[in-house]
Image: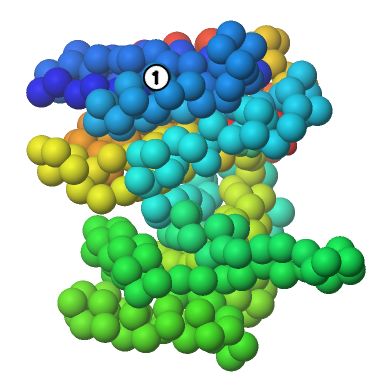
Amino acid sequence: MNYAIALVPGDGIGPEVIAPATDALDAVGDKYGHIFNYAELEAGGKAVDTVGEPLPAGTLEAAKECDALLLGAVGGPKWDTLPGHLRPERALLGLRAGLGVFANLRPAYLLPQLQKACPLKDEILIAGNPEKKPTFNFLIVRELTGGLYFGDRGRSGDHKSAFDTETYSWEEIERTLRTGYDAAMVRRKKLCLVDKANVLESSRLWREVAGTVSKEYPEVETSYMYVDNCAMQIIRCPGQFDVIVTSNLFGDILSDEASVLTGSIGMLPSASLGARGKAERTMGMYEPIHGSAPDIAGKDIANPLGTILSAALMLRYSFGLEKEAAAVETAVTSVLDAGLRTKDIAGFSEAETIVGTKAMGEAVLKALEK
Ligand code: NAD
């Protein structure tokens, strides 16, 4: 089967971490008989430099023609003083809106090889884990294109008061919940809706919609939790969660909190999904959760595993290639088992070999070719 992938390497470490991810995809293609065709596109700071805007119309149009998009990262100090509409990060909002992706999936799991990198004590990890192991594995599904970040906002005439508005429609909530329930069905079949329904009317609407949608997923156990409690539970007992579904604002904060528990920002992938499109493929935008890391760009020390694991999510969610996605994830686990570590995840076990970005990518490739 042929798949078209839009590639936006972007700025800073973006191109360094994208290269090993496409190498991994190509190795999977060779092994399982798929062809991945890439359309390399410019967005972010690089596009500001070459064409004067962060998201050239041609980039969005070309991305829409593809089945999915893989992005490194955009931004950097060089463009920090530009006005808002020219900032590289604007490209991310434009791509999300233009590709119609509305649900951001952020897995948070602790690999046994990185257990010592987690700031939580073993007994805390074990307490909430159904298998009584010092680990956790949950998925945050964050609504991405609505709520407080997109609502009406403004200042009073004298600029001494300001407002932001949280608005959600039934449809926006329903499609996000469906993404969460579909994910729960192939995981441990538990979904927790996180909100502030004791105070916010919009949260009460989320609960109403969940009451309706949950009936279509009788196998999934649905629970509800206030966001303040959830922020505590993530560090008190992360093993209790399977899928968390929440609004844009709450998801932004909780997913960063969760990422700290996994060892390094360089390890975590993310997927932003839209509706099912042509040939039953789900348009998706895949990227590591980290930024362009200008402090380490060009030094061959960035961790490429978050981007490689993002490519695995692309195989799973956009192309339905579960076996292939699992092969990439297993390859990553095996290089960690062999003791290979980039600098950001080093120092937590005795038998480690510190490697650079390229060597880590090559090790994953070798593991995939076995
Ligand atoms: P960052 O994620 O780029 O870096 C934070 C810290 O983590 C840095 O010390 C960095 O060296 C380290 N780090 C990040 N990724 C790493 C990796 N793969 N391996 C090893 N270490 C890694 O966040 P920041 O410094 O706040 O932002 C830098 C730029 O990136 C800014 O311009 C910001 O706007 C942009 N940004 C872009 C995205 C995106 O493209 N999706 C996301 C966040 C930030």
Which quadrant would residue 54 be assigned to in this image? top right
How far from the left and from the top, in percent, is residue 154?
72, 63
Outermost residue, bottom side: 198
Residue 201 in the image: above or below residue 252: below
Residue at x-position 56% and y-position 12%: 51
How far from the left and from the top, in percent, is residue 199?
62, 88
Residue at x-position 80% and y-position 69%: 156
Query: Can you say which quadrant of the picture contains the N terminus?
Result: top left
Residue at x-position 32% and y-position 69%: 171
How far from the left and from the top, in percent, is residue 130?
42, 70
Outermost residue, front side: 157
How far from the left and from the top, in percent, is residue 247?
51, 66
Residue 165 in the image: above or below residue 271: below
Q: Along the line of sight, which residue is nearer the eye, 26 or 285?
A: 285
Q: Is residue 36 visible?
A: yes
In the image, what residue type sits under mark 1?
Answer: Gly
Question: What colouring method underlies this structural image?
Answer: rainbow
Q: Along the line of sight, which residue is nearer the eye, 141 or 10?
A: 10
- Which image quarter has ligand 1? top right
* Residue under numbered circle 1: 58
